[in-house]
Image (cartoon, coloured by chain):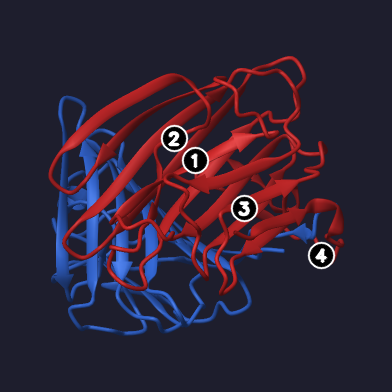
Amino acid sequence: MAAGSTYTPITTTTLGSAQSSVTFSSFSGYTDLVIVCANLKNAVQQTPFMQFNSDTGTNYSSTWIAGNGSSASSSKLSNSSSGILIGDYNIGMSSTIPSTAIIQIQNYSNTTTYKSTLGRYNLTTTEVYAIAGLWRSTSAITSIALNAGGSSNWSSGATFTLYGILAA
Amino acid sequence: MAIRFASASRIGNKLPRTSNFWDGSAVVVNSSYESIATVTVGSGGSSTITFSSIPSTYKHLQIRAISRDSRALTLNSLAMRINGDSGANYSYHTILADGSSITADGGGNSSNTDYMISTGSSALANTFAVSVWDILDYSSSTKNKTIRMLGGTDLNGSGRLNFTSAGWFNTNAITSLTFFGSGSASFVQYTHFALYGIKG
């Protein structure tokens, strides 16, 4: 017997105009979070990042694998103040092909472990990414900022949906 | 060592059904994704984590985990057995990346799945590896079973990502899952495994 249905849509933001960041700050009561970003385009080429609890310290790091249809590569970014990598610098490269990103944040509200994330990013005509992220803080995550990066903006029409998953 | 055990039959039906969701691969209806059981390891640690008496009323299963174990390594293998089967009935293939290089590996005639990871006791303190496992058509009594996994961890200077698939060459319906680390490791406190059912 199951404990009950879950994977609940909490909120969706669809941009009516370009803006540099989207923030979620009301999502208590779940075990895991999933963020689905669709129709992503940046005004200019910039690497997008995710920050938690408005922390701008050098407490983020990312390891990723990428493939572009002919070769694969892996790289990492440590002690970053920008955040956990969401996608690639080329996210703004195409004016017609938007990107998608899906980010898993598990056990986000515990106060005993650092927070680990798993992300997937796709620019269908160019590349695919998987990203392991770390925020070196034992604080519960209470806000999530999805930043377009640098001086760039998320383009109008981008959608950002936050889901909550509750474990039995 | 203690054995953590979660029986689905012990779990009551508590939560309301709501609208839609996306599991990252396909759009499904929120009411079709249900929490079945969860294990959180306590202060004594646990050598295995088992979900048993899994009902056959779903189409697919998903396991979402954060895990760290006692083995004196930075990363340790996280494996799974189905229905208690320790015969050479599993295969697995993976692409793994560590932040600088990418390799692929695989194996057959194995006694368990392989190539998911937990952080070990030598890893950066307070870090747990993350994994999501999907077991497709698990209650079929006519098909061998297929599992796909995405797991990883970043340790601020090193890291790992695994894309892994596995097969269990048995047509029996899956009724139990057991997770364990290599080298007789014990899962440490706060390790967390949650089992979900997806209706079809």
Q: Nearer the viewer, residue A60 or B48?
A: B48
Find numbered disc 1 in the image and state the secondary structure of the residue it sits on: strand
Where B105 falls versus B2 (above or below)? above
Q: What's the distance in space between the residues labelled 2 and 3, CA to CA? A: 16 Å
Near mark 2 (Cα within 10 A), the count class, few <14, some 14-19 or many ≥20, is many
In the rendered structure, the colour chosen for chain B is: red
Query: In the rendered structure, which disc, 2 or 1, sits on the residue that comes first in sequence?
Result: 1
Q: Give the residue drawn at x 49%, y 65%.
A: B188
Query: In the rendered structure, which disc, 3 or 4, sits on the residue that comes first in sequence?
Result: 4
Q: Is A117 situated left or right of B61 in this image?
A: left
Decide: marks 2, 1 in contact (CB < 8 A)?
A: yes
Instruction: Please give the residue where the numbered disc 1 appears in the rendered image.
Output: B79
Protein chain holding label 1: B
The verdict on a common chain for dots 3 and 1 is yes
Identify residue type, mark 1.
Answer: Ala
Q: Which mark is residue B114?
A: 2
Instruction: Please give the residue where the numbered disc 3 appears in the rendered image.
Output: B49
Q: What's the distance in space between the residues labelled 3 and 1, CA to CA? A: 11 Å
